[in-house]
Amino acid sequence: MKTIPSDIEIAQSCKMKDIHTIAAQACILENEIEPYGKYKAKLSLDILKRLSSKPDGKLVLVSAITPTPAGEGKSTTTVGLGQALNKIGKKAVIALREPSLGPVFGVKGGAAGGGYSQVVPMEDINLHFTGDIHAVTAANNLLSALIDNHIFHGNSLNIDLREVIWKRCLDMNDRVLREIIVGIGPKSNGFLRQDYFMITAASEIMAILCLATDMEDLKQRLGNIVVAYDADGKPVTARDLNAQGALALLLKEAIKPNLVQTLENTPAIVHGGPFANIAHGCNSILATKMGLKLGEYLITEAGFGADLGGEKFLDIKCRYGGLNPSAVVLVATIRALKMHGGVPKTELETENVQAVQKGFANLRKQVENIRKFNLPVLVAINKFSADTDAEIQALEEMCRSQNIEVVLNECWEKGGEGGIEMAEKLVEMVQSGTGGYKPLYDLSSSLQQKVETIAQSIYGADSVVFSAQARKEIKKLEKYGYDKLPVCMAKTQYSLSDNPDLLGEPKGFKITVKDVRVSAGAGFVVCLTGDIMTMPGLPKIPAANVMDIDKDGKITGLF
């Protein structure tokens, strides 16, 4: 069997082009880039002004089946597809999210694609990159500091200390920060109250950064953040604290998308990093819009499965960005389908056609979900070396029996060359002009109706149970008109249900909404289901334990 080097070894052996060359390749002018070293740069928002009259390229979303520990490969497919499109003569740009340090040092070890379909410089992208996530963390925690400072100095806004809903954040998995007490010590330390940290990817400011369309829109959204409620139950906003200007200052560089490249020198825009299980899971509107102006095709991805990132991309991001996607590529692996079919991770190398057939139910459901937005779907089978011909053939036959377009995707092993058939089928699908994007629900529907639509139509739930706390919060949001916002479901990524142990296509389950929170700045209502955490923990053996750097600065162990 052919031995393929590790992702980081592949990345370190590639020949990157100077970022000025990549920019010129994408028709970006010299004065529109701000280099961060030789191989990465910030992009000026003036690009959008200059190209405002240029028609947009075709927008293609890469989504996936419900994720498993076996892996699916959305980012790898996104990168590989972009490379493949360029190989067949189509000018393609890709747009990805920025990795969070939490998962990088936790389970994943890296998030820049894999094999011969990666964005580089991989080490920089996975670590501090251009500082965007740190800027979000600083802005988030500045707002926390301003809230507590206001309370300490007389609390003229009459904030109810029991109703401070703005939380601190940190870009690291740290379970001990899930519940904390602030203000311990003398009176000069402020008032004692319970608080907690979220991971930065879950911060509303991260969502705002990714949904803002320009600096003015960013500042407006920052001002709209509901930070607390006063003694009469009225919302208190960041604007009430005169905080929006200072927050925007911290984000003045972070709002600019970042330009890097793939292993095959395809331009790649990497910007923003909200999680899809606890936020909306898409890169920035600005990055996507910029890519649409710079390329014939803009290939982007949304986090986790089509029931999470895919739904949020189509119901939240596309609404706010005025985006009109042309098609969806749905990634699946034989390995993951076998897990959905009941095979433990330790036995995935053994051929099991029956398990693939059983796990197909999850893929079929996710295809159904995309079709509910009236979009064409191309299933990409992300091939692993242990996949057998019999397993692949069985999956292809099941897809065709359901009138599902399917193609073998070998981008991990072969780079763009391994995605040529996928690229050709996608172009054919897009050029046929079938479909016509439409959102799943109407914003004028009640909050309960929107949640029920998502839960029943997308997840396959029988019904939705709202806790007493959730019903109380919904009434409060209705009073102030927040119930007409889109819904962002916070749900486990491991199941279509809110129970991570229910794999495949579960039936006969209910979705339980435990709490409801408004993200008025981002422009959506977050509904927390199951036991979802906004501050993840590290595994028993974190990826950090195998990472190292030598005396020459060479990094090892980063995936």
Image (cartoon, helix red, strand yellow):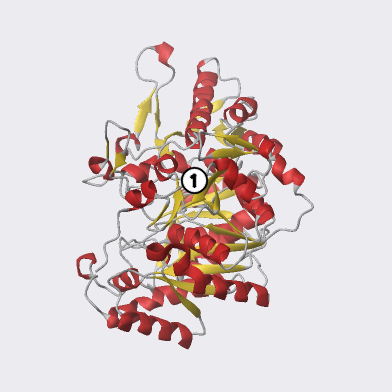
Q: Where does residue 426 sit, x and y in percent of width and height?
A: 57, 72
Instruction: Determine if residue 233 is in view.
Output: no
Neighbours of disc 1 within 10 Å: few (<14), some (14-19), many (20+) = many
Q: Where does residue 31 sit, x and y in percent of width and height?
A: 68, 36
- Tell me the residue at 64%/28% (across/down): 240
Q: Amino acid at mark 1?
A: Gly
Q: 391 or 375: nearer the eye?
A: 391
How many numbered circles does the render carry?
A: 1
Q: Where 133 falls versus 434 (above or below)?
A: above
Q: Where 518 falls versus 67 (above or below)?
A: above
Furthest-right residue in view? 53
**Residue designated by label 1:** 273
- Tell me the residue at 49%/63% (across/down): 63
Quadrant of the image for the N terminus? bottom left
- Tell me the residue at 34%/15% (across/down): 185
Q: Where 155 falls versus 400 (above or below)?
A: above
Q: Where 529 falls versus 336 (above or below)?
A: above
Specify whether 143 is left or right of 198: right
Instruction: Determine if residue 8 is in view.
Output: yes
Q: Where does residue 292 sit, x and y in percent of width and height?
A: 66, 55
Identify the element where label 1 is drawn: loop
Q: Where does residue 68 sit, x and y in percent of width and height?
A: 33, 63
Q: 458 or 8: nearer the eye?
A: 8
Q: 199 or 512: nearer the eye?
A: 199
- Tell me the residue at 60%/34% (across/down): 34
Q: In which quarter of the view is residue 225 placed? A: top right
